[in-house]
Amino acid sequence: MTEFRSFFLLIFLFTQLPFLSFAQPGEYLSEYSDYPALEKKIKSLENQPEQSMVYVEMFIRKAKKEGNADNIHKGYLFATFNSREEIQLKYGDSLIVSSIKLNDRNKTGEALLSQALVYQGNENYEKSLEYTLDALKIFEETKNLYLINTAKYSIAEIKTFLGAYSESNTLFIETTEFFRNNQKRIGNTDYRLYYLYSLLGLIGTENRLKHFSESQNLIDEGKAYVSKNREFLGYFPYFVSSEGTNFYFQNNYPKAIEKLNEALKLYDDKWKHLTEKFYIGMSYYHLNQYDKAIPYLQLIEKDYDETGKLFPEFRPGFEAMIDIYKNKADKDLQLHYIDKLLIITKKENESREKIRTRLEKKMGETELLAAKKELENYKKWQKFAPIWIGTILIVAGLLFYRNRSKKLRKKISPHSEDQGFSTTETPETIALSLHNDAPFTAEPTEITPTTLPLTEPESSEPTDFSKYAPIRKETVLLIQKKLATFEEEKRFTYKNIKLSSLARDFGTNEKYISAIIKADKEKNFNEYLSDLRIDYFLQLLKIPENKLKSITELSEKTGFTNNEMFHKEFKKKFGVSVKQYFGKD
């Protein structure tokens, strides 16, 4: 339903026109010499933006010549809708400036929200969120409830794109409730459309939060509504599609394929409907029907190649392609998709530097680089394999000849078999220099914590969710899953992690994370983070390559901001200093 989200920009821009003041028509000179005629022509060409812009520019020139501020503003709004990329953003800026000149706060808010939607369409979520929040502030000042909820809807969409489903879910609940109870029509603005948008957004987040019964109830509500209000029957396939994704997230892949295909047959438009095709491809992937999955996932890749844009929810499609070609033993295509996913990951990382919202994903940049290196090494091995195999055969032949010669000797030295290197080594003395930067010369003794997994094993006993009250069971399970991923991906090694940033990454609030950590681990967030880092430090010591590395060098890999903090937390955990712990003084 990515095209549906883009369609929201279309609807928003034209439904805001009633809020703009209309100038009195000028003297009729030709067919398109007055504003109503120009406006009618512009709207008739809404699917042909290049032709439409000819009349938009005529509209703006006429308004400027007459000094008609209201219609200058209106012309810029038309231009924002009909232009693309950089030109669209420039007209958006002009729209904001013209609204300020009109000294109308609501129009300024509308202009800001319009520009936010343009940035959102260009996947600049940071700018989109910035403009939307500015618009929301204005609408709250003017107490325009319709525009307040329109802005909140836009914020919820941004958060959905970025994977903050809990936060977007809360906003969608609010906007759905508002538009469900406010379905008036004012001018060309139909509140019922925003009810449908909010309802579909809410269904999407309920699916991802695994609130399947709630999602199905909302789907049934939407189907019944559009069936009753037949002017909106074109939205019926979107609810069928939502039913398909509902089945997908329940791992009912055959039913998901059935519903998504049903939706594709019902659509009567020219949109690509990549969302449906993506989830069909992913369903076939999970069913291990790779040959059926590939064509659908290739459509996502093709669109990315053509537009340079990728909706975050489509990212697993590239991960699936890597896995598919791994199973097919096609190293070249594995490398192809790893390289492509590295580029995508880099863009995501740049975005996360500005908006601290982490997308759920299986493979991070580190894992991708490791996989790429492994495949490249394999390809090098393939290149030189004939030489190596030939060398091995020659050496094997020489050894065979040597052994055969030995057996033919009549006398064999009784000590001949004892010559050569010993297979056992003398134990090294465990020692740790008093200086923190001195290298390790041996394994540390009795490092009991390294035998424990970073993630606590799940108990076979049923969980008592009452200890998490008032947090809902579904929210508890979601946060526990995210914490497990946080540990598995070793994201605790990132420096300057705070509870607030983790809450934003998880799409929840700080109190929930703290409460769940306290209930499950019996420690606060800082203790939890510190213990993860120290246990990881002890694991690093077990790696042979790290024997000669200093404490400082290894501690820096754990996420502690500095060496002093590492030593402080280590002593706090074990009651002794690092030197005492390893030296057993």
Image (cartoon, rainbow, N blue to C red):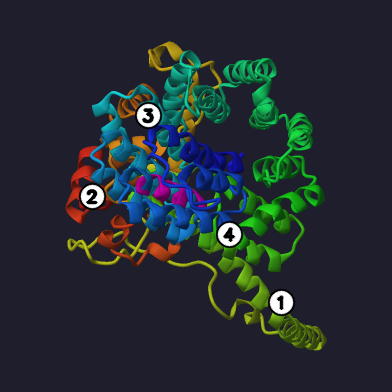
Whether the magenta-drawn stretch holds residue 78 is answered as yes
Q: CA distance from mark 2 to mark 3?
A: 50 Å
Of marks 3 and 4, the one in the foreground: 3
For the stretch drawn in magenta, the main secondary structure is helix
User: At numbered mark 2, what does the secondary structure look like: helix, strand or loop?
Assistant: helix
Residue 76 in the figure: left or right of residue 161: left
Mark closer to the chain start, 1 or 3: 3
Q: Which residue is mark 1?
A: 382
Q: CA distance from mark 3 to mark 4?
A: 31 Å
Residue 442 in the figure: left or right of residue 40: left
User: At numbered mark 3, what does the secondary structure look like: helix, strand or loop?
Assistant: helix
Residue 158 in the figure: left or right of residue 45: left
Which one is in front, 505 or 490? 505
Of marks 1 and 3, the one in the foreground: 3
Mark closer to the chain start, 3 or 4: 3
Indicate the quadrant where residue 350 lies. bottom left
Q: Which residue is mark 2?
A: 566
Which one is in front, 565 or 416? 565
The amino acid sitting under disc 4 is Thr
From the top left corner, tell me how far across and down residue 228 is, in percent: 67, 15
- Note whether 248 is above or below 561 in the view shown: above
Boundaries of the magenta span = 72-82
| Residue at x 67%, y 43% (from the top left corner) | 273
Of marks 2 and 4, the one in the foreground: 4
